[in-house]
Image: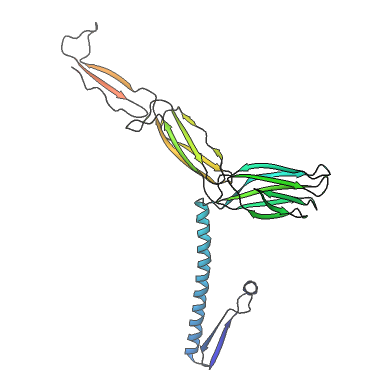
Amino acid sequence: MLAEAVVCPSRAYRQAQGSDCFERETINVRKNRPDGTAAIAAWRARLNLGSTLRLGQRRSWLLIFLLLALLGVSQAGTWNAFGPQNYQQTTPTPQAVTSTFSVHSTATTYTLVVTGSTNANPLIVLNGKTVVNQTNPNVSQNVTLALNNTISVTVRGGVGSSVTVTISGVDNDLPTITASAKPGPNAAGWNNSNVTVTFTCADKTSGVASCTPPVTVSTDGANQVIKGTATDLAGNTASTSVTINLDETAPNITPSQTPAADSFGWNNTGVTVNFACSDATSGVKTCPAPTR
């Protein structure tokens, strides 16, 4: 006979999927026949395989997200290009208050957010264009900025009414940072005097919030890693480093003679002078050959 096998998952899964059952399959089953049992077993095996694959896919996505987090892949950050600035009506006649501000880039998304007292009735003009003119002061909308901007705010809700204005921007870009060390090393990669490492930071969208100040290396040692970090106004960071090998200590050299002198400090035969050289930090480059 023909039997229709219906697979119904757990109640939580059905609620999440919005359906009672998610898979139907018609199987040729003959009562009391081994082939019918085999068909059902094969069908169940395929179902279990599908469930295993779906679980594997979900785990794969989870692993990808965790890997991105470990690699430090940044999400979009935001910063305040203007404000928050509070405006209040202090006289019976509303007065416009004008401010100027600048941004590094016009090629990103900017959002004007206005909050305030009920019926503050703000009038906001940005670069000569009216962007807000309504009784309700609560506004959130995208705006277009120039590199240099003028904003005018008039609160018209009566004495004591006020609004707070903020313009935020989106920054998807990491800042840049480079390092330079002066004086530079010799051909062997070593310095024999103090080294100053200077970091130069830049950000094309929100601007630089902080940059590691110059670092002076004055301690002898090899492979000294000096790291610097740039942070932009949106909280994105980038780092770089430079490796310094510093040896300000002179090497040691010790002479010895063969044969030794007599008690009066004299030799009556030819003398060979040998030199033993050592250096605890950078190592010995040259040492004098024996002299006769």
Q: Residue at x 66, y 55 (%)?
A: 141
From the viewer's side, name the closer residue of 249 and 275. 249
Residue 247 located left or right of residue 232 = left
Q: Residue 111: horizontal and vertical position, in percent?
A: 64, 52
Residue 2 located left or right of residue 150 = left
From the viewer's side, name the closer residue of 12 and 154. 154
Location of residue 183 by image quarter: top left
Q: Is residue 204 above or below residue 255?
A: below
Q: Is residue 215 above or below residue 262?
A: below
Q: Residue at x 53, y 92 (%)?
A: 2
Q: How many marks?
A: 0
Looking at the image, the residue that sits furthest to the left is 269
Q: Quadrant of the C terminus?
A: top left
Residue 241 located left or right of residue 81 = left
Q: Residue at x 53, y 73 (%)?
A: 51
Looking at the image, the residue that sits furthest to the top is 264
Q: Residue 114: horizontal and vertical position, in percent?
A: 71, 51
Q: Residue 275: horizontal and vertical position, in percent?
A: 26, 20
From the viewer's side, name the closer residue of 57 and 168. 168
Colouring of the image: rainbow
Q: Residue 82: horizontal and vertical position, in percent?
A: 65, 45
Location of residue 8 by image quarter: bottom right
